[in-house]
Image (cartoon, rainbow, N blue to C red):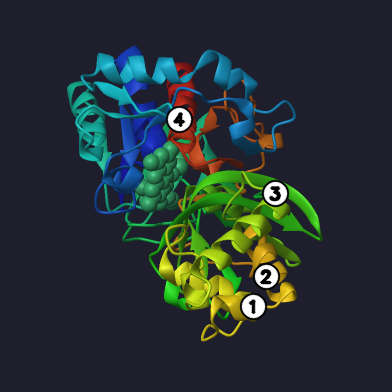
Amino acid sequence: METIKVYTAIIGGGASGLMCACVASKTNPDKKIIVIERDNRVGKKILVSGNGRCNLSNLATCIKNYNNSFDDGINFLLEDYPPSKVIDYFSSIGLLTMRDFENRVYPLSKQASAVLSVLRNELKRNKVQELCDTEVIDISKHKGGYKLRCSDKTIIAEKVVIATGGKNNYAQKVVGNTYAVAQSLGHKVTSLSPSLSPVKVKSNVIKSLKGIRAQGSVSAVVNNKPLKSEQGEIQFGADCLSGICVFNLSRILNREKNAKIILKLLPDYSFLEIKEMLNKRISLINNDSVQDIFTGLFHKNIGIALLKESKIDTNKKANELSKAETNALANTVNEWVFETIPSNDFSTAQVTAGGVSCSEINPNTFESKKAKGVYICGEAIDVDGDCGGFNLQFAFSSGMCVGEQL
Ligand SMILES: Cc1cc2nc3c(=O)[nH]c(=O)nc-3n(C[C@H](O)[C@H](O)[C@H](O)COP(=O)(O)OP(=O)(O)OC[C@H]3O[C@@H](n4cnc5c(N)ncnc54)[C@H](O)[C@@H]3O)c2cc1C
């Protein structure tokens, strides 16, 4: 079996591993660095990110955008490796960026491939070897360094970076336990669940809304306690709700049993204001079908679904509605309640909530507390962020931080 000796072995050719390799190779041009990737090419997830446009950072990044198990959060990283540092670095290797009205940062070309290309070009200039189709199975201590057992070879390295990403392998050919490598060094992995994914709901009336979008606010309620609210565009699926604001609640709702989403289609109106509005609309259309009550307000199918959800016969005329029915309808518009179904489906998730326990990682350097000279960065760690560039910002900044330690 072939044996390769290097100074640094970076396991995982995703956003964090590639950034780490770029920074480390620039600082240490004489030390041999290798990026080991089990898939047939590096950076596949970068290519699909942001719908192929790669929302690589967010200028409004702050601590509340992240969940993590570090005692003090990721304050150090946000202070020392803020979005501006990531953006400046990209600019230094040739990538110009732009920000949108919500502070989301994209390549100026709006092409995710541009992000991957500048990283790979920098690796080429710095003579970093990419070793694809090679899975690292485990790591063990070896003469002051480490031995990496791979599918068909052994790699001996003084320093090792674990940048193996999360459990969600969207767009990737090779799937398997991405945490096995860290676990082989004794690291614990916290409970894992899909995040930034659609949320499955129990509903008999939304099938016909598939693909329809609406503006509103959504709240995650668990055991009757509201835990998180978001406002924006909601997308209906045949059996799920999605859209960025729902994605941001999915971390909670995919885990919890007794949970629901409360959707407010008119979040700026009170129940009484909605009732008054409905009464006015009913008098206006009078003898016409109840289905016309929402014409000019919501998509026609949403109107019909609201009537069905309120147990109103959709063949009625508007002026046939009873007071109780108008109340029920106003109630549904005000708070449309969807019982949610917990999910363990990582195939539609953008990120994994949970990962290598932060209590076993030095928060200032990302060095493993279990193995000196081993660093862990990116989504492999128990850190996950909201939708909007926060996850790539974490992957790039933690990769950069580790690259500077090597
Ligand atoms: C569809 C989609 C869209 C997204 N859009 C955005 C967005 O616009 N903005 C944003 O901020 N975030 C986005 N994300 C999330 C973001 O892409 C990830 O958080 C980020 O890519 C994580 O980078 P990483 O390097 O930590 O992990 P990954 O990118 O997952 O890379 C890890 C790599 O390690 C390899 N690997 C794993 N185990 C081994 C092993 N044992 N041996 C060798 N190789 C191994 C994997 O094959 C993989 O290539 C999106 C995610 C998805 C799925």
Q: Residue at x 54, y 50 (%)?
A: 216
Q: Is residue 186 visible?
A: no
Mark 1 or mark 3: which comes first in sequence?
A: 3
> Badge 3: few (under 14), some or many (20 or more) residues near its Cα, within 10 Å?
few
Amino acid type indicated by mark 1: Leu
Amino acid type indicated by mark 4: Gln
Left or right relative to 360: residue 91: left
What residue would you read off at disc 4?
Answer: 393
81, above or below 188, in the image? above
> Do tag 3 and tag 2 residues touch (Cβ < 8 Å)?
no
403, above or below 309, in the image? above
Percent across and percent down for residue 140 are: 54, 44
Amino acid type indicated by mark 3: Ser
Q: CA distance from mark 3 to mark 2?
A: 15 Å
What residue would you read off at disc 2?
Answer: 326
> Do tag 1 and tag 2 residues touch (Cβ < 8 Å)?
yes
Image region (quadrant) for ligand 1: top left
Q: CA distance from mark 1 to mark 3?
A: 21 Å
Q: In front: 370, or 235? A: 235
Q: CA distance from mark 3 to mark 4?
A: 38 Å
Q: CA distance from mark 1 to mark 4?
A: 53 Å
Q: Residue at x 32, y 34 (%)?
A: 34
What residue would you read off at disc 3?
Answer: 270
> Badge 2: few (under 14), some or many (20 or more) residues near its Cα, within 10 Å?
many
Q: Where is residue 175, by image quadrant?
A: bottom left
Find numbered disc 2 in the image and state the secondary structure of the residue it sits on: helix
Left or right relative to 258: residue 297: left
Mark 1 or mark 4: which comes first in sequence?
A: 1
> Do tag 3 and tag 4 residues touch (Cβ < 8 Å)?
no
Find numbered disc 1 in the image and state the secondary structure of the residue it sits on: loop
What residue would you read off at disc 1?
Answer: 321
Find numbered disc 3 in the image and state the secondary structure of the residue it sits on: loop
